[in-house]
Amino acid sequence: MRLSDFDFDLPEELIATRPASPRPSARLLVAPGPVAIEDAHVFDLPRFLRPGDRLILNNTKVIPARLSGVRRRVSAQGATEARIEVTLLEPRGDGSWQVLAKPAKKLRDGEEIHFAPGFSARVLARAEGQLTLAFSLAGTEFDAALDAAGAMPLPPYIAARRAADARDRVDYQTIFARHSGAVAAPTASLHFDQALLEEIAAMGVAFTEVTLHVGAGTFLPVKVDDVRHHRMHAEWGEVTEAAAAEINATRAAGGRIIPVGTTACRLIESAAGASGVEPWRGETDIFIRPGFDFRITDGLMTNFHLPKSTLMMLVSALMGRERMMGIYAHAIAGRYRFFSYGDASLLLPGE
């Protein structure tokens, strides 16, 4: 398998920079089985579900992980300042954070970055393009300061076109976000509002929530030609004992397990055991590519992904590469909107 096997040409105007409003008005490409394609909208989703199915939702909450600060330095030439942009990546066990900083070359170990009155961070270490920062606040005080000073960490393909604004605080968060820790949204879930969830529940479809804190590594490009040599970034997740029991009960009763988003899919497949899903907590770097044996997933609701990305490989593993290339050709010809704020697909390989 070569990286070029997962490439396709995407017109730039199909990259969405704002979501559909209302959320379920986004378009939905439905692909049952090996041939058929149906054009619909997310509000049509109940038509394609059956009583007894179970949707798996990722309840991670995106933190406003992008900070703008100032590094101050006094030298023989006098006082100087440098503007520093910081993106939080993941917390460490000692309370510090791994971050990306631009421009990192303007920082030295021990220096401080000031973000707001009383809110700063000290550089502990620098390695492989990342920094380790110790913040001046912790716990709820840190959360409050980050909420006040931070901006939503929009994906690079949106950030290159416009800055994050107040609308993104709502648009880039699911309505069932509960557990803070993600620096990217589980974007397939952005299409749901409360009314749609209630309509789906009323028809006898159940929901199970799991947590996978999506990391910035989800946007990192694959740099190897032979994709078997690619190493995935690790992300922290949890499948509770109750969640595992719900999924296993649905499988035993003949219902379909349909993750909403590749993050939920990767998590439940990470938690797959000999007799179904097992309670699971920790980091996963599972890499789902063609040839992968899905043990839990029967279908997948997901957005349209970047060319040559690991997510394109995941959906190709579920549906087959040729099938996915045909689906994407249909989506491009039909002017579907792509990526995080774009439209969705419902992939049902067993139909």
Image: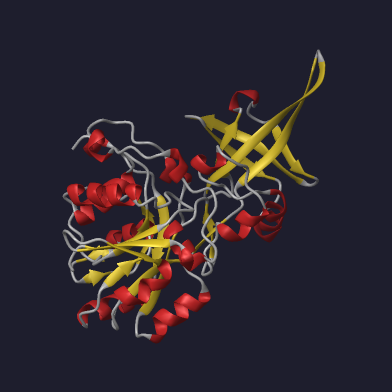
Q: Nearer the viewer, residue 265 or 350?
A: 350
Q: Position of residue 210 (x, y in %)?
A: 41, 67
Residue sticking out furthest to the front: 334
Note whether residue 287 is visible.
no
In the figure, is residue 312 to the left or right of 211?
left
Rendered-image quadrant of the N terminus: top left
Residue at image location 28% in from the left, 82% down from the top: 52
Rendered-image quadrant of the C terminus: bottom left
Residue at image location 68% in from the left, 60% down from the top: 140
Q: Position of residue 348 (x, y in %)?
A: 24, 65
Q: Nearer the viewer, residue 14 or 252?
A: 14
Where residue 263 sits, quadrant-wise, is bottom left
Note whether residue 115 is visible.
yes
Residue at image location 30% in from the left, 47% down from the top: 312
Residue at image location 47% in from the left, 29% down from the top: 128
In the figure, is residue 218 to the left or right of 265?
right
Is 86 situated above or below 175? above
Q: Nearer the viewer, residue 95 or 170?
A: 170
Where residue 83 sits, quadrant-wise, is top right
Is 118 situated above or below 268? above
Q: Position of residue 251 (x, y in %)?
A: 23, 77
Residue sticking out furthest to the right: 78
In the figure, is residue 45 to the left or right of 198?
left
Q: Position of residue 120 (x, y in %)?
A: 72, 42
Figure label count: 0
